[in-house]
C-alpha cells in the first residue's frame, strides 16, 4: 500500500473513494499516512522519531509523573492532607492565623478523605515538611531516571525506563 497514489481528479466514483478510505484505514493500522502532493495524495510511511525525540518525550513523561505525584495527598501524623497549590495556600494561611493565637491554638482541618482532625501550627508545618521530604525524593528519582534516559543508546532502551513504584 505504501507509495500508492490517488489522483485528485480521479476521486469521483464510489469505488475510488472506497479505495481511498481503505487506504486510510490501512495507514491507521500500519504507521503510515496519506500526504497531499498537489495533484495527488500518496500513502507514505510515518518516519520513526529520532533517538533525541524519543528521549525528549520520555523525559517529559517522567516529569509529568513527578509533577502529579507532588500533588498527591501528604501523609503526616497518621492523617492524609491534600497538597495541591490551593491546599498549600490554605495551610500557609492557617499557620499564620494559628501563630497569632498562640502555640496551643487549634482548628479543625478537613483531610483528604473529607474527615477532620484538630491541628496546630506545628502540625501544619509538619505537613509542609513531609511534603518537602517527598518532593526531594521525587526530584531525586526524576533526575536518576532522566540520567538513564540520556545515557540510553536506543529507543528500545529508553522505552524500558519507567517510573516504577518503590
Image: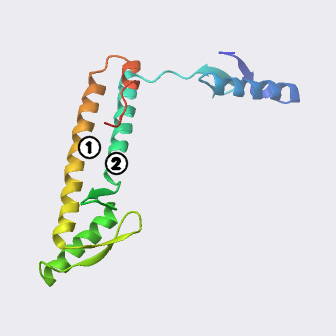
Rendered image: mark on residue 159:
none
Residue at numbered disc 2? 69
Q: SS for tag 2?
A: helix
Where is residue 129 shown, x and y percent of the image? 18, 58
Which residue bears the numbered disc 1?
138
Residue plotted at (22% across, 43% down): 137
For marks 1 and 2 on the same chain, the one whose residue lies earlier in the sequence: 2
In this view, the residue in front, 128 or 37, is 128
Identify the residue at horizontal 71%, vertical 19% (top origin): 5
Using the image as rendered, state which of residue 106 and residue 88 is in the foreground: 106
Q: Is residue 42 above or below residue 118?
A: above
Residue 97 in percent (x, y) is at 20, 80
Q: Describe residue 9's horizontal placement relative to residue 123 as left or right.
A: right
Tell me which residue sits at (37%, 44%) in the image: 64
Q: Does the rendering let one see residue 90?
A: yes
Q: Which residue is painted at 39% across and 69% down in the image?
A: 115
Hey, which residue is sitting farthest bottom in the picture? 101
Residues under labels 1 and 2: Cα distance?
8 Å
Q: Is disc 1 in contact with disc 2, using a CB cutoff of under 8 Å? A: yes
Q: Residues within 10 Å of mark 1 (few under 14, many from 20)?
A: some
Q: Secondary structure at mark 1?
A: helix
Image coordinates of residue 11 in percent, x first then y, are 80, 28
Image quadrant assignment for residue 1: top right
Say whether residue 33 is left or right of residue 74: right
Residue 83, by quadrant, is bottom left
Q: Is residue 36 visible?
A: no
Amino acid at each position: 500500500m505504501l507509495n500508492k497514489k490517488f489522483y485528485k481528479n480521479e476521486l469521483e466514483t464510489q469505488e475510488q473513494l472506497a479505495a481511498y478510505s481503505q487506504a486510510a484505514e490501512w495507514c491507521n493500522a500500519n504507521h503510515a499516512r496519506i500526504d497531499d502532493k498537489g495533484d495527488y495524495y500518496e500513502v507514505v510511511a510515518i518516519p520513526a522519531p529520532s533517538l533525541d525525540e524519543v528521549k525528549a518525550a520520555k523525559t517529559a513523561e517522567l516529569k509529568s509523573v513527578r509533577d502529579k505525584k507532588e500533588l498527591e495527598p501528604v501523609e503526616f501524623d497518621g492523617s492524609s492532607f491534600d497538597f495541591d497549590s490551593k491546599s498549600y495556600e490554605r495551610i500557609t494561611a492557617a499557620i499564620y492565623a494559628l501563630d497569632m493565637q498562640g502555640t496551643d491554638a487549634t482548628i479543625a482541618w478537613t483531610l483528604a478523605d473529607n474527615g477532620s482532625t484538630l491541628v496546630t501550627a506545628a502540625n501544619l508545618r509538619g505537613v509542609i515538611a513531609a511534603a518537602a521530604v517527598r518532593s526531594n525524593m521525587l526530584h531525586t528519582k526524576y533526575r536518576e531516571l532522566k540520567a538513564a534516559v540520556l545515557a540510553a543508546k536506543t529507543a528500545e532502551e529508553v522505552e524500558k525506563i519507567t517510573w516504577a513504584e518503590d
